[in-house]
Amino acid sequence: MPSDLQGDDARRDRLARAIRPDNDGLPRLMGILNVTPDSFHAGSRVSGEAAVKRGLLMFEAGATWVDVGGESTRPGAEPVSHEEEMARVLPVIRQLKAANPDGLVSIDTRHASVASAAIQAGADMINDVSGLRDPGMMDVAVNTGAAVCIMHMQGTPQTMQDDVQYDAVVHDVHTALFSTANELVARGHPSDLVCLDPGIGFGKEHHHNLALLNGGEGLTDGERWAVLWGVSRKSVVGHLTGHADPDDRLPGTLGLAALACLRGVGVLRVHDVEPHRDMLAALRPFNLKG
């Protein structure tokens, strides 16, 4: 049975706008809320009431979205059971929506059962790093009308950096994402509720990441698709700046976030909402829309 989310035109319009650049052509911000003990950036790990408090602070700092995840997908991360993942994220989602009903929440999961439960708990978007590989994930998206982020990942978190190969990385990644997005739309999901993420650091070497960031504008496919970037404090920033510790990568992250403003990116997924808000405020007077 489709949820009210699918039938509410005003809500659908709001979600469609929230995954695209704002009226100034600048990206929306999505705060990262890792309800996990093992995500790659230790400063992002939080649980329980502390997670709810941090999420509410992200909204106050200017985040359009708060992305709640209960399973680390860093390279080499071990999977957790669906039950454990739900136990971590569902209470946080419910409390975030209770405290801020107008705040938009995404569920960062690879699993259809978790996505379905999260949407029932109040989540507005499915953010799937596996690119909707779970056979039931497209059905969850279509039946609920939630916004969907389709990310590209080669392999799994356990294997994705073991044997990284592409014929032409930008073409290969874009083609794979377009194929999945078109299949989802063919099943009945609105195209304006779909955004695509090239999956920086997920089954890519440094030169692959740079090529994808440089070719990011092509992922919109003539503005048909919204685009999300997740580069915050990742290894690509470490390679560019020489900082091995994610704690030292905020300035480099802000540099890539500024690049996103020139690439038509609709959503920036970030650990640090307030510095990104200030960076966008500094760019706003300069009409980057051209």
Image: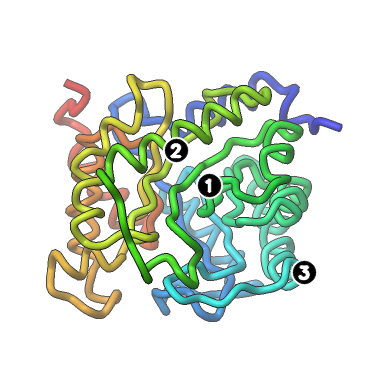
Is residue 26 visible in the rendered image? The answer is yes
The reply to whether the C-beta atoms of the residues labelled 2 and 1 are less than 8 Å apart is yes
Q: Which mark is residue 83?
A: 3
* Rendered residue at 18%/26% (across/down): 287
Q: Could you say which quadrant of the image residue 222 lies in?
A: top left
Where residue 164 appears, as percent x and y from the top left, is 33, 62
Of residue 8 and residue 283, the one placed in the foreground of this image is 8
| Residue at numbered disc 1 | 131
Mark earlier in primary sequence (2, 1): 1
Up/down of 61 relative to 174, above or below: below
Distance of label 1 from label 3 (alpha carbons): 21 Å
Distance of label 2 from label 1 (alpha carbons): 8 Å
Which mark is nearer the camera, 3 or 2?
2
Where residue 127 appears, as percent x and y from the top left, is 55, 48
Q: Residue 177 carries which label?
A: 2
Where residue 198 appears, as percent x and y from the top left, is 37, 46
| 4 left or right of 164 in image | right
Quadrant for the C terminus in the image: top left
Which mark is nearer the camera, 1 or 3?
1
* Rendered residue at 55%/50% (across/down): 128
Quadrant for the N terminus in the image: top right
Of residue 262 and residue 101, the one placed in the foreground of this image is 262
Q: Which three-letter amino acid code belongs to the residue tagged 2?
A: Leu
Is residue 105 visible in the rendered image? The answer is no
Mark earlier in primary sequence (1, 3): 3
Q: Which three-letter amino acid code belongs to the residue tagged 3?
A: Glu
Question: Mark 2 packing: few (<14 Cα in 10 Å), some, or many (20+)?
Answer: many
